[in-house]
Amino acid sequence: MPAFLQRKVGFPMSRDTIKYISMLTMLINHIANVFLPAGMWYTNLCLYIGYFTAVTMCYFLVEGYGYTRSKRKYAGRLLGFAVLAQLPYQLAFPENGIAGFVQFNMLFTLLLCFLVLLAQERIHDRVLRGATIVLLICASLFCDWALLAPVFTLLFIWARDSRPRKQIAFAAAAVLYGGMAGLGSGSLAETVGCAVPILAAGFVILYLYNGQRARRGRSFSKWFFYTFYPAHLLVLGLIRILA
């Protein structure tokens, strides 16, 4: 690895700054999904940009799990805002679903990822723990970012505080998603377009992240990250309906 990548490089970013970036990339992705014509190069580019978000959220979910004072309140917030976001999600993406079932939004997926973390910590019997995690991964089939987000979470659980393992985890996540996209579409561009944003997230987190929250506005940022998801979906859904 080049020497300049062995340490943090310039422009250190707080956790909140990186989360704001991920909110922006998600917004770009959702605008493209709702309003831009499918198959156009600029639509695909906007969709690819949004793939920065999910892996970033999974990383910080794993990190935040270790810091949170009340896991019950953490899970409660995820569940509450997931329920709140479901109608806006359906308004924005009415066609989303699997085999005719309604698809649940990304906050439900993150809740399942949280339960994976909880199972990993609290269930000591290896067989029962493994079976529980498999069931949670299967449950994600009815959610946005099915299968991938729980697997990303498992990769980051495995990586924990090891930088080499984190590098491997992000690389594996990029290969996994890029490979799945490429096999599904038969397109090298799709493979690269899906893998690169995950690698970009890995670079930002591993080499720009300073390991801290922002010094100011912590309470605002905390609730903004929860409320932005249902709020922006509601706005996009209403515009879609009224346009």
Image (spheres, rainbow, N blue to C red):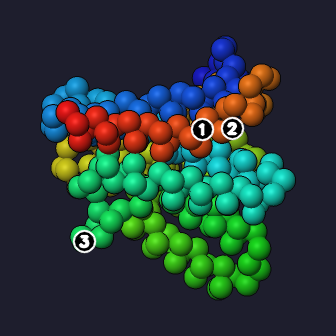
Which quadrant of the view contains residue 233? top left
Circle number at residue 200: none
Instruction: Count the marks.
Output: 3
Helix, strand, or loop for circle 3? Answer: loop
Q: Quadrant of the N terminus?
A: top right
| Residue type of the residue flagged with mark 2 | Lys
Q: Which residue is mark 1?
A: 225
Left or right of 167 on screen, residue 33:
left
Q: Which residue is mark 3?
A: 99
Q: Which residue is mark 2?
A: 222
The answer to which of marks 1 and 3 sits earlier in the sequence is 3
The answer for how far apart the CA atoms under marks 3 and 2 are is 35 Å
Residue in front for this viewpoint, 134 or 167: 134
Please indicate, yes or no, whether residue 73 appears anywhere in the rendered image: yes
Q: Position of residue 39 (x, y in %)?
A: 15, 37
Q: Position of residue 66 (x, y in %)?
A: 78, 53
Which quadrant of the view contains residue 214? top right
Residue in front for this viewpoint, 2 or 127: 127
Residue in front for this viewpoint, 156 or 85: 85
Please indicate, yes or no, whether residue 154 appears anywhere in the rendered image: no
| Residue type of the residue flagged with mark 3 | Ala
Q: Position of residue 241 (x, y in %)?
A: 23, 41
> Tag 1: Cα neighbours inside 10 Å, few (<14), some, or many (≥20)?
some
